[in-house]
Amino acid sequence: MNLIQGIIHALTQVHPPHMMVVHFPIALTGAALFFILLALWKRSKVLEQVAFANISLAAASTIVAAIFGIRDNLVFYNGIAPNHIAKIILAITLFIITTITAIARWRNKNLFYMKSTKVLYVGAYFVSFAIAAVLGFLGGIIVFGV
């Protein structure tokens, strides 16, 4: 029982949990972009579906990462972590873009195949990954300094 209590204490009091969960939105937006590009190249319905699944999971994981990020900012940085306002704004933007992309694709399974929406749909994957990468860089500034 002491081991479990020690792990819970380390996860909630010693080690900021945001650092553990933040990698999910970064990896999922990267994977989504990778698979949408493969789907374009190979003209594959299955690869587009994998990209859609990844962008959907990225939207959900962004919420979890944001909750822990706000909590860790308050607990470990007294609410004044470097660039915390920019990170909050970018995280909200990432959540909105990934959620809109996932919902639009869920409602219209042919979004990827329609000429009128294909560029915007694929572009949302690029923008999502770019925002996640910038968030990761700003997080690195908080952890490692300038």
Image: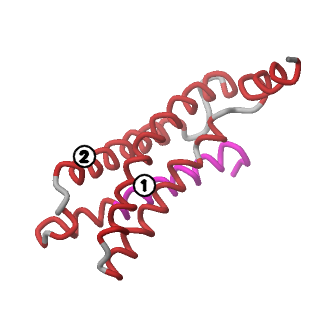
Q: Residue furthest bottom?
A: 41
Q: Secondary structure at mark 2?
A: helix
Instruction: Report the front residue among 112 and 74.
Output: 112
The majority secondary structure of the magenta stretch comes to helix
Tell me if residue 66 comes above or below residue 122 in the rendering: above
- Is-magenta flag for residue 137? yes
Work out whether mark 2 precedes mark 1 in sequence or the reverse, and give the earlier one: 1
Q: Residue at x 45, y 69 (%)?
A: 34
Tell me if residue 74 comes above or below residue 129 in the rendering: above
Answer with the quarter of the image where residue 49 lies: bottom left
Query: Hey, what amino acid is under mark 1?
Result: Asn
Query: Which residue is the site of mark 1?
Result: 54
Disc 2 crowd, CA 10 A, few/some/many (<14, 14-19, 20+): few
State how far apart marks 2 and 1 are (Cα): 13 Å
Q: Secondary structure at mark 1?
A: helix
Residue 113 percent location from the top left of the image: 18, 70
Q: Residue at x 66, y 33 (%)?
A: 17
Disc 1 crowd, CA 10 A, few/some/many (<14, 14-19, 20+): many
Query: Which residue is the site of mark 2?
Result: 103
Q: Residue at x 31, y 44 (%)?
A: 99
Tell me if residue 75 comes above or below residue 142 in the rendering: above
Instruction: Report the front residue among 27 and 53.
Output: 53
From which residue to which does the magenta span run? 125-146
Query: Hey, what amino acid is under mark 2?
Result: Ile
Relative side of 10 to 95, left or right? right
Relative side of 99 to 6, left or right? left
Instruction: Report the front residue among 102 and 17.
Output: 102
Answer with the quarter of the image where residue 32 lies: bottom left
For residue 28, the mark is none
Residue 92 percent location from the top left of the image: 39, 39
Residue 85 percent location from the top left of the image: 48, 36
